[in-house]
Image (cartoon, rainbow, N blue to C red):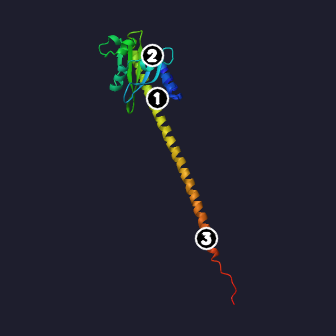
């Protein structure tokens, strides 16, 4: 029921950041995560933080340094979910300095897909509780990632539509200007023709004088 309500919220909210913050708030509430991040894939460099929320439904300050870049990058590159009950002790995870510095324990990160491929990742963590994300939480996060994927694709299509609309408006304005210039030129030529016609119809003037 909460996910259905979230879909309704995503459809009503026009602002993209507010839209994704609402989704992250729901992710935190439903999974017991301490924090949630929506990370967009970039051609080069670290993932871009689109939105970041904490358990108090506040924006996370300096969000780009508050999550494991290595885990997020792996998910965005390979497209496979990563779940760990205790990040600093998990032999399957290549522990990075950020994992130790941030004191991360439970982490779940999974890709968000649209028809053209992976565009983002949904990342949740908890620094105080190990084993926070079980099968139920994984199922919830997978459903959320699908919903966010639909929202991202919807936002992309809306942006595409807006850009096309701007292009069409610009083309229409240019066409109207061209039509006005052509109409003015036609009117000018019409005046020239009328003037020449009047002169031709009046004929040459006869020379005056007395014949003797």
Q: Give the side of residue 176 with respect to residue 63, left or right.
A: right
| Disc 3 from disc 2: Cα separation | 85 Å
Q: Residue furthest bottom?
A: 212
Mark 3 lies on residue: 197
Mark 2 lies on residue: 35
Q: Is residue 100 above or below residue 112?
A: above
Q: Is residue 104 visible?
A: no
Q: Is residue 182 above or below residue 157?
A: below
| Disc 2 from disc 1: Cα separation | 21 Å
Q: Nearer the viewer, mark 2 or mark 1?
A: 2
Say few, some or many: other residues with alpha carbon within 10 Å of mark 2 (under 14 / 14 to 19 / 20 or more): many
Task: Find numbered disc 3 in the image and state the secondary structure of the residue it sits on.
Answer: helix
Say few, some or many: other residues with alpha carbon within 10 Å of mark 3 (under 14 / 14 to 19 / 20 or more): few
Seen from the viewer's position, the closer of residues 51 and 22 is 51
Q: Is residue 209 above or below residue 57?
A: below
Quarter of image, res 191: bottom right
* x and y, in percent, of residue 11 in the image: 51, 28
Mark 1 lies on residue: 151
| Disc 3 from disc 1: Cα separation | 68 Å
Q: Nearer the viewer, mark 3 or mark 2?
A: 3
* x and y, in percent, of residue 101 in the image: 38, 12
Query: Between disc 2 and disc 1, whose residue precedes?
Result: 2
Q: Is residue 109 visible?
A: yes
Task: Find numbered disc 2 in the image and state the secondary structure of the residue it sits on.
Answer: strand
* x and y, in percent, of residue 212 in the image: 69, 90
């Amino acid at each position: 029921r909460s996910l259905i309500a979230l879909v309704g919220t995503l459809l009503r909210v026009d602002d993209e950041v507010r839209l994704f913050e609402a989704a992250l708030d729901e992710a935190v509430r439903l999974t017991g995560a301490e924090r949630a991040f929506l990370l967009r894939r970039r051609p080069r460099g670290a993932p871009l933080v689109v939105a970041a929320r904490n358990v108090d439904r506040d924006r996370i300050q300096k969000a780009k340094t508050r999550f494991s870049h290595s885990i997020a990058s792996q998910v965005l590159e390979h497209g496979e979910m990563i779940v760990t009950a205790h990040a600093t002790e998990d032999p399957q995870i290549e522990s990075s300095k950020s994992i130790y510095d941030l004191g991360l324990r439970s982490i779940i990160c999974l890709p968000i897909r649209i028809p053209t491929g992976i565009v983002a990742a949904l990342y949740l963590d908890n620094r105080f509780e190990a084993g926070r994300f079980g099968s139920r939480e994984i199922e919830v996060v997978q459903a959320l990632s699908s919903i966010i994927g639909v929202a991202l694709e919807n936002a992309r299509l809306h942006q595409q539509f807006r850009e096309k609309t701007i292009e069409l408006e610009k083309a229409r304005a240019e066409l109207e200007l061209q039509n006005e210039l052509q109409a003015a030129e036609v009117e000018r030529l019409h005046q020239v023709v009328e003037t020449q016609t009047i002169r031709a119809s009046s004929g040459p003037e006869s020379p005056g004088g007395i014949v003797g």
